[in-house]
Amino acid sequence: MIATAANALTELFEHAKDTLSDEKLDWLAGLDSVAECESTNISMTLINLAIAQGSEDRSTLPNSSQLAAILFGLSAQVEMMSALSSVSSEAAYILAQKAKSQA
């Protein structure tokens, strides 16, 4: 497994999910809003790259190494969004199951 922030988040959640309080699970269930914000940031970055690419002023274009860094960063952000969404969904599911069993 490649060591990334997204992998760390999902591994930590997997190890802790059975011991988390309902308040912490509720907080984690709200991470979908963070993923939504990140998706907006990625969209804006891609729009700006497209605008730069379409510009006649080539000085606005990132060079190859800059573009590679931007793309690697976007990839890491997408991976983190996936992890945030996964943790959020699972935390919400655990809370719903707890509520169901208490009813």
Image (tube, rainbow, N blue to C red):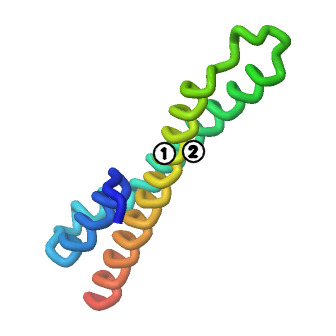
What residue lies at 39% left-to-right and 77% top-to-bottom? 93
Q: Residues within 10 Å of mark 1 (few under 14, many from 20)?
A: some
Residue 7 sits above or below residue 73 on the image: below
Residue 72: give x, y in percent of width and height. Answer: 51, 41
Identify the residue at the far front of this view: 64
Going by the numbered disc 2, the residue's amino acid type is: Ser
Q: Please, is residue 59 above or below residue 89 in the view? A: above
Q: Residue at x 38, y 73 (%)?
A: 90
The crowd level at tag 2 (other Cα within 10 Å; few <14, some 14-19, many 20+) is some
Residue in the picture at 62% in, 21% down: 63
48 relative to 29 in the view: left or right: right
Q: Verify CB contact (< 8 Å) between mark 1 and mark 2.
A: no
Amino acid residing under circle 1: Gln
Pinpoint residue 58: horizontal percent, then vertical percent: 76, 12
Labelled disc at residue 77: 1
Q: Quadrant of the N terminus?
A: bottom left
Helix, strand or loop status at disc 1: helix
- Nearest-to-viewer mark from 1 and 2: 1
Front-lying residue, 85 or 75: 75
Residue picked out by circle 2: 39
Secondary structure beneath disc 2? helix
